[in-house]
Amino acid sequence: MTAFDQPPAGPHDPQFRCAVWTQAQGVDPIGSAESFDAMILVEWPLPWPHDVSEIPALAKAARAPGVRVMAVVPDHDQSRDGLRRVVHRWRVRTNELVGVDHRVAVAEIPALLDSLIEDPFRDSSRWSTAVGEAPPEVLVCAHGRRDTCCGRWGTRLHIELAARGCDARVWRCSHTGGHRFAPTAITLPEGRAWASVDADLLEGVVARTATVADLAEHDRGTTGLGMWAQVVERALFNEYGWGWLSTNVTRAETTIAPNQQHATVTLEWEGGRATGEVEVTRTLPVLVCGSPPELAQKSAPELRLSSLEMG
């Protein structure tokens, strides 16, 4: 759905832009969503370093296990009083992270983050810094120092989506993972990651008007499960439609074969059970944007659901 009309500017070969190359290989993005059960968004002005953990005020929180800390470009209309917004979200079921908005002075951000990571699943809505419930949100990765494709196409997508005034708060955010699938996004409160997205797709996700089956090729998976289980969970999302996002997976068990090329996943929820066989179909290089595949330093598996048994 995303049209790459021209390559990002830069010194390297445009045919090896990571997102362009990955789309040309027809890679299924499922299983590439990073897993976490708590998230903290912090308004922090550009430029951002390669990793937000290099920002001193965010460094300690960014190292906290199980908590995803991300920078978002400040909303200047809301920050004229010198305060910054910090959004605290924690998982209450597989596809729901409830959220609370906080606003504090810049100097107070480290102390607030320290309090949040002490127990990231504690309800912070009654704290003195809280200003209300976090609304639905769309995080569009536009972290140019991390990846050229995200910096260009993510920035363009953020501008377009924000201008449309969709029924969600739209942030330009730091690295979401999976830059090879740029432009990438995470939608909240469901905490689902998306690949090769455009504004129409994201509006359809926010409004729940998109046909779920049409989203499959863009669905990287729920952040509430690991990579193998994400493959089975996507099949259930396709089977049950939007109502599935209100279902809580009460048990997730994954048995990985010794060769790491196959796994058996069992998911259980109230009134249902599914067992899926998931296999690696191929392993592809993760390009350093602008450099050919043979210079890649990392690789990633492409996963496929080979069978699914319900009941």
Image (cartoon, grey):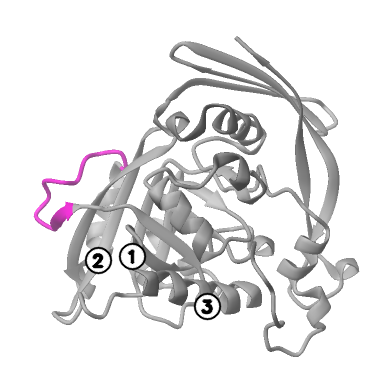
Q: Is residue 286 left or right of residue 217?
A: right
User: As displayed, is residue 77 above or below residue 298?
Assistant: below
Q: Of marks 2 and 1, which one's residue comes earlier in the chain?
A: 1
Query: Which residue type does callout 3 highlight?
Result: Arg
Are the residues tagged 3 and 1 within 8 Å (C-beta)?
A: no
Query: Can you see residue 203?
Result: yes
Q: Residue at x 77, y 45 (%)?
A: 302
Query: Residues under labels 2 and 1: Cα distance?
Result: 6 Å
Query: Which residue type does callout 1 highlight?
Result: Val
Camera-side residue: 26 or 105?
A: 26
- Which residue position is annotated with label 2? 85
- Which residue position is annotated with label 1? 42
Q: Residue at x 39, y 67 (%)?
A: 171
Q: Residues within 10 Å of mark 2 (few under 14, many from 20)?
A: many
Tell me which corner region of the image, top left, top right, bottom left or bottom right, holds residue 11.
bottom right
Q: Residue at x 66, y 61 (%)?
A: 181
Q: Which residues are magenta?
A: 120-132
Query: Residues under labels 3 and 1: Cα distance?
Result: 21 Å
Q: Residues within 10 Å of mark 3 (few under 14, many from 20)?
A: some
Query: Residues under labels 3 and 2: Cα distance?
Result: 23 Å
- Which residue position is annotated with label 3? 156
Query: Which residue type does callout 2 highlight?
Result: Arg
The quadrant in which the C terminus is found is top right
**Secondary structure found at label 2:** strand
Q: Is residue 126 magenta?
A: yes
**Secondary structure found at label 3:** helix
Q: Is residue 95 left or right of residue 8?
A: left
Residue 73 picture location, percent across and down = 37, 74
Q: Residues within 10 Å of mark 1 (few under 14, many from 20)?
A: many
The quadrant in which the N terminus is found is bottom right
Are the residues tagged 3 and 2 within 8 Å (C-beta)?
A: no
